[in-house]
Amino acid sequence: MSTAIVTGGSRGIGRGIVLSLARAGYDVVVNYASNADAAKTVGAEVEALGRRALLVQADVSKAGDRARLIEETYGAFGRLDLLVSNAGVAPNVRADLLEAGEESFDRLIEINLKGPYFLIQQAANRMIAQEPGDSPPKIVIISSISAYTASLNRGDYCVAKAGLAMTTQLYAARLAEHGINVYEIRPGIIATDMTEGVTAKYDKLIFEDGITPIRRWGQPDDIGRAVVAVATDLLPFSTGQVIDVDGGFHLKVL
């Protein structure tokens, strides 16, 4: 059986990924930072699909928590076939680029970039050392259209996501010799609790202004399906690849 870790797996995009992987036959380690009740709900949903779920509270910005997440995974399942680095946060307060302070910047870099960077390092070393499974291990980094789209009142978020894009390239190049492919999935405008406060804004952009050629909100399941495509070896000759799941937002149209 195959085992996956999904960081930030208790809600939103993470939950969509967890359930998609469970449907595809994966046992899933559901990592969460603080919402134990949400994690328990997702864990029960995984088990209802006939798969095993391990719930692990861990703050990916903390080295000790990252190490414990990996150790608990191997303690329960004995191996790791897929790491989905999804955990991330938005700025607590949006601020103009010329006025924003260091506190928010440091927080977002710690959680959204440094944490994933070193969690991937730990997971990759364990993947290299473990016995081969039914298919090669894989790593998926969930970034954002903010990796290349300038948002002047949340520069910290954009910088962190752009850093994840390079993280993908670095690990893809380094791990190819070990048969570990690395992919970056860039979600667009997805209906989650993170976008609840700006629903009216994005409704106008999507349905009236046509900011996405596919005129609908993205759903967590859209991201989950993309992860499953990678996890089930549908892209074996690709690594370092960016997979846009954004309704066509990335297209330039005259």
Image: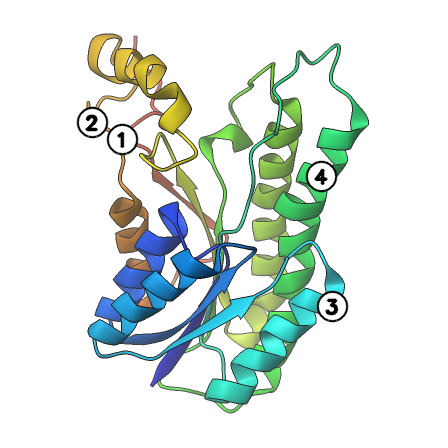
Q: Is 111 situated left or right of 140 in this image?
A: right
Q: Position of residue 199 (x, y in %)?
A: 33, 21
Badge 1 marks a residue whose secondary structure is loop
Residue 162 vertical position relative to residue 43 in the rendered view, above or below: above
Q: Position of residue 141 (x, y in %)?
A: 50, 52
- Which of the two discs, 1 and 4, sits closer to the camera? 4
Going by the numbered disc 3, the residue's amino acid type is Gly
> Which residue is painted at 64% across and 40% down in the image?
163
Task: Give the quarter of the figure containing the N terminus.
Answer: bottom left
Mark 3 or mark 1, which is nearer the start of the sequence? 3
The Cα atoms of the two marked residues, 1 and 3, are separated by 38 Å
Q: CA distance from mark 2 to mark 4?
A: 32 Å
Lower sequence index among marks 1 and 2: 2
Residue of label 4: 107
Q: Position of residue 22 (x, y in %)?
A: 28, 69
Q: What residue is pinned by disc 3?
A: 64
Q: Are marks 1 and 2 in contact (CB under 8 Å)?
A: yes
Classify mark 4: helix, strand or loop: helix
